[in-house]
Image (tube, coloured by chain):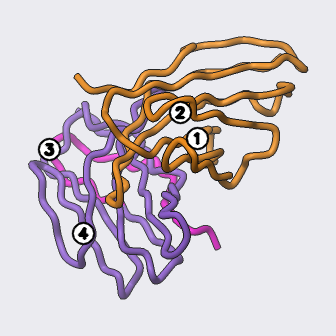
Chain colours: A orange, B purple
C-alpha cells in the first residue's frame, strides 16, 4: 500500500542535542508538511514543501529546519532541542490542488 | 478570534444515536473543508472533504457546509463505541499557499 512513514517513532533526547526526524512516502504526492501537536493546541504547521525546490515556513518554524532530499523524503531538524519542543510530530503529504492531506504515524519526541 | 473553532467536548452520546459535531471558521473566502478522526496517540485520518454548500454523505457520515454562516458540521449516524475519538475540523484559507488550518478538535465519547 502507498504509505507515509516516519522514523523514529519515539525519541527521548536532552536539551541542546541535534535531532532529525525523517519522513518518507510512496504515495507519489508532490507536497509534504511537518506539523506538531500539543494537547489543547491542535495541529500546528512547522514547514511545508510543494516540490523539492520549494520550501516554506509555517506558523511555528522558529527552532526548526527542514530538508527536502527528494520528492519522497522530507526531514525535520531541531538544531538545539529544548524542552518546550516536546510534542507529537506528524508528517503529511498531499497531491496538487485538492490538498487532502494524509498523515504518517507520528514521532513522539521528549526533550529532557 | 481563532481561524477554526470547535467545541472541545467531550460530546457524549449513546450507542445508536446521531452525533453532531460543529465547526466555525473566520475566513469568508475559504473553499475547502475537511474532517479528520484521531484516536488517542494515533495520527489524524481523513474521513470527509466538502467543497460546496449543502450536504455530502458517505456511509454513516454526513458533512454539511454553510459558507454564508461560515459553518461546517459532521453528523455520525448510528454511532458506535468505535467512533469514540477526537474529530478535527480543517479549513484551507483563501489566498497564499493553500495552507490547511486545524481546529483543536472535539472529543466524542459513544457509550454502550
Residue pointed to by mark 4: B64
Residue pointed to by mark 2: A90
| Residue sitting nearer the eye, B77 or A62 | A62
In front: label 1 or label 4? 1
Same subunit, tags 2 and 1: yes
* Boundaries of the magenta span: B1-21
The quadrant in which residue B23 appears is bottom left
Marks 2/1 in contact by CB < 8 Å: the verdict is: yes
**Element class at badge 2:** strand
Q: Position of residue B47 (x, y in %)?
A: 26, 46
Same subunit, tags 1 and 4: no
Same subunit, tags 4 and 3: yes
Which chain's residue wears label 4? B
Residue pointed to by mark 1: A35
Q: Position of residue A44 (x, y in %)?
A: 61, 48
Q: Is residue B16 magenta?
A: yes
Q: Position of residue B28 (x, y in %)?
A: 47, 83
Q: Position of residue B90 (x, y in %)?
A: 43, 58
**Element class at badge 1:** strand
Which chain's residue wears label 3? B
Amino acid at each position: 500500500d502507498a504509505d507515509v512513514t516516519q522514523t523514529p517513532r519515539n525519541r527521548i533526547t536532552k536539551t541542546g542535542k541535534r535531532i532529525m526526524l525523517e519522513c518518507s512516502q510512496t504515495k507519489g504526492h508532490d507536497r509534504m508538511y511537518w506539523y506538531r501537536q500539543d494537547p489543547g493546541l491542535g495541529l500546528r504547521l512547522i514547514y511545508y514543501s510543494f516540490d523539492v525546490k520549494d520550501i516554506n515556513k509555517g506558523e511555528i518554524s522558529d527552532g526548526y529546519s527542514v530538508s527536502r532530499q527528494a520528492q519522497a523524503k522530507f526531514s525535520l531538524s531541531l538544531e538545539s532541542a529544548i524542552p518546550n519542543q516536546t510534542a507529537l510530530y506528524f508528517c503529511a503529504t498531499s497531491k496538487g490542488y485538492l490538498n487532502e492531506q494524509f498523515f504518517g504515524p507520528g514521532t513522539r519526541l521528549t526533550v529532557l | 478570534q481563532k481561524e477554526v473553532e470547535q467545541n472541545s467536548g467531550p460530546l457524549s452520546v449513546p450507542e445508536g444515536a446521531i452525533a453532531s459535531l460543529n465547526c466555525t471558521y473566520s475566513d469568508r473566502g475559504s473553499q475547502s473543508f475537511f474532517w479528520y478522526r484521531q484516536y488517542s496517540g494515533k495520527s489524524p485520518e481523513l474521513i470527509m472533504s466538502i467543497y460546496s454548500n449543502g450536504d455530502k454523505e458517505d456511509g454513516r457520515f454526513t458533512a454539511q457546509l454553510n459558507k454564508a454562516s461560515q459553518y461546517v458540521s459532521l453528523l455520525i449516524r448510528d454511532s458506535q463505541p468505535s467512533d469514540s475519538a477526537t474529530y478535527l475540523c480543517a479549513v484551507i484559507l483563501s489566498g497564499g499557499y493553500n495552507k490547511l488550518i486545524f481546529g483543536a478538535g472535539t472529543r466524542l465519547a459513544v457509550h454502550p
